[in-house]
Every structure is written in C-alpha cells, then in structure tokens.
Image (cartoon, helix red, strand yellow):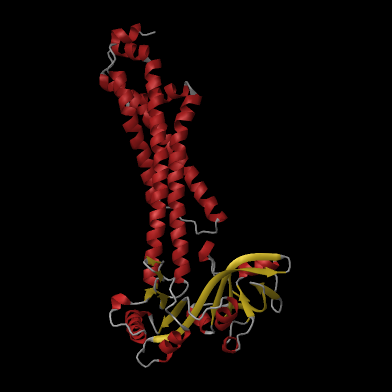
Amino acid sequence: MELSEILSTALEALMLNKMRTALATLGIVIGIGAVIALVSLGQSSQMAVQSQIQSLGSNLLTVMPGAQSSGAVRGASGGGTSLTLDDAKAIMTSPQVTTVANVSPELSRRAQVVAGGNNTNTQILGSTAAYADVRKITVASGRFIAQQDVDSMGKVAVLGPQVVSDLFGDGANPIGQSVRINGMSFRIIGVTASKGGSGFMNQDDIIFVPLTTAQKLLFGVDYLGSISIAAKSEQVMSQARDEVGYFLLARHKLSNPMQADFTIMSQEDMLGAASQITGTFTMLLSGIAMISLLVGGIGIMNIMLVTVIERTREVGLRKSLGARKKDIVTQFLAEAIILTVVGGVLGMILGIMLSYVVSILMSLPFTLSLTSVLLAIGVSGGIGIIFGLYPAQKAAKLSPIEALRFE
C-alpha cells in the first residue's frame, strides 16, 4: 500500500468514531501541554531568580553567621549570632582588607505593619546608609536611611513600592505619614524604586529602618543577620573573599578555617544554588507531567485493542484478499501514530498558551524551550509506535478464517 492510501484509510477509520478518537487523543494533549508548560514555568522562575540576584551587583559578597547549635542539635546555616556591628566596622577600616569598597551591616526580620485600617506582614530590614550603595538601591521619592538616623536610633522608615501599594494603595505618596511596626510608630521618609521579584525574593516588599533601631527597639538583639560587602571590582572578588575570611577568623580567634563561625557567599554561589533548586523543581514537575503522557499512551493502546476486536472481520477479509501481515501492522500502527501526533501538536499549542498566561499572571519572563517542544512532539510519536505496536501485531496475527467467523 502507498503512504497516501495508508494515511487516508487510517483517517477514515478514526473518523468513524469521533468521540472515542477525541478521548484517546485527550490524554496525549494534556500530557504534552503539561510538559511544555511546566518546563517553561521552571525556566521562567530560574531566569527571574537569576535576574534578581544579578541586580544586586556582580561584585557583591555576603557574610552569613554560622549555624546556631543547642546541645547536640545544629540549626540551619545563617541562624547563628556570631556577626556584630563591630565586625562590619572593622572590615571597612582594617588595613589588612584592601579590596573592599563598602560594607553594609544588616538585620532582617518579618513583622506585622499597620497603616490606618490596612496591615501587611513584610520584611523589616535594619540597615545603614551604605546599603543603598552596596545593594544598588535607588530611591524613587524622599531619601534613604542616613548615618544620623543610625546614630540617633531614629524611628524613620523607607518603604518598598509593594508595601506602599498594600498599605496606602497604588500611586499613593506616603512620605511624611506614619506606619506602626510591632506597635511602634515610624515616620516614612522615602520610597524605593521597583526592583521586581515575588514571594520571599520580592525586593519591593520590604521596609528599611535604621540598623540600631531594628536591633535595640524592634527586635532586642545585638548581633547582625548578615554583612553585605561590595568589592572594588569584579576582578578582585576572590581576593576580597580571602581577605575578609582570614580577617574574621583572626578577629574571632579561630585558627582553623574549618571551624569558621561564618560563611562567605558570592553572587556565583547564590546563582549556582538558585539554579540547582529551580532545576530540581523543574525536573520534578516534568516527571509528574510525563506520568500523564504514560497514562495517555496506555489509553491509546486500550482504544486500539478495542478497535482490533471491532474490526476483526475486516482484518480477516483483507487477509483473504491477499493483505500481508506487514500491511495490517502498518495500517493499525498508522492510526496510533496519527492519534499521538495530532495530540502532540494540540498539546504543544496548549502548552505554549498556558506558559504565556501563567508567566503574565505570575509576573515572570516568558520563555519557551525549543528543546522541550521538539522533545514533547518526538515523545508523542514514540508513544504512538510503542503503544500502537502491540495491538497492530495482534491484528496481524489473526487467522483469516477465524477472523471471518468472528461475531
């Protein structure tokens, strides 16, 4: 049989029962669409996280305290209290550290914030004037935290645009108004420019207060949550990391680097960790989506087996007229491949549409992996061959006489 005849016969057979054909194709459509959409979502999330980390600057080092231990129980890294404001000042002024341009001591906690009848739970970050330079923060209106505010433990606050929207509404100018953080009143002196983000990585959902105010008045601690360090250039990052590391070891009276009560992370470390997390998340979601593809393939095999039973007499008639086993296998296999390829194309369209809609709703960059699209289509064709081969071979093995007698 010629290819055109095989395809036309297969299409004619599939159109005889449109509902069954549509239901058989649906599993492939959902599976392919889910694979493309979830891979795209994972890549978009990875790009968004990378963009947020890179926006902090390519010459940024972050010193985190070591894990806090209680008896034999060791807490998470970064939960310790080993860093102090004196450490940050010493790094900036020490003649041993020659590659550091600026140092920003920080303390971050989440707290409930109230303004009028509105309230929100957001990140409160105690900082100094150096934070804006180190972290590349731009003030859209008003001003940022000044050294005078830190020295006097001023009750002033700089709000991120998301906080302004949550507490005062879109487009509001809150400069001069007050917010209450943990029941304490703070005067708003500035609003930062939007940097974007979502969830815990949202750099717009944040309130800056003077570091000393956060330590003494809001949270009652004398340690830091982290120290951000701007190296003089991207080329001296490794040297700056070594200088700061050895300086803090000596300052904390530690001779063995393995006993360090702090961790120094660069932007490359953060990007690598973020990429690993989002990559694992994408693979997990894709694995779940592949299960639906497998279910769709099994559904097609079931449909084809039913079709073989229904067309047993047709197979017997063809064989009695001289059709070879290869012709029967090709005919039924063509029907299975058409089902999966059509489902693959429809699933591709569905996946692209879902990816676009989700990226808009979640404020993520829209990205589409050509590899995932081609792989999904290839997999759908492979499913047609794999799950269509058994029913096709079963039909080809039917005895012409027994097939013609089949009722």
Relative to 57, does residue 318 appear above or below in the rendering? above
Horizontal relation, residue 132 to residue 157: left or right: left
Towards the viewer: 17 or 358: 358
Q: Position of residue 277 (x, y in %)?
A: 40, 59
Q: How many labels were placed on the picture?
A: 0
Q: Position of residue 50 (x, y in %)?
A: 44, 65
Q: Position of residue 116 (x, y in %)?
A: 73, 69
Horizontal relation, residue 297 to residue 126: left or right: left
Image quadrant where residue 196 sits? bottom right
Q: Quadrant of the C terminus?
A: top left
Towards the viewer: 124 or 79: 79
Q: Quadrant of the N terminus?
A: top left
Q: Position of residue 264 (x, y in %)?
A: 37, 76
Horizontal relation, residue 208 to residue 265: left or right: right
Towards the viewer: 114 or 171: 114
Relative to 274, does residue 184 appear above or below in the rendering? below
Residue 130 visible in rendering: yes
Residue at (41, 30) in percent of width and height: 299
Image quadrant where residue 62 sits? bottom left
Q: Residue furthest bottom?
A: 95
Towards the viewer: 331 or 123: 123
Relative to 279, does residue 217 appear above or below in the rendering? below
Residue 141 visible in rendering: no
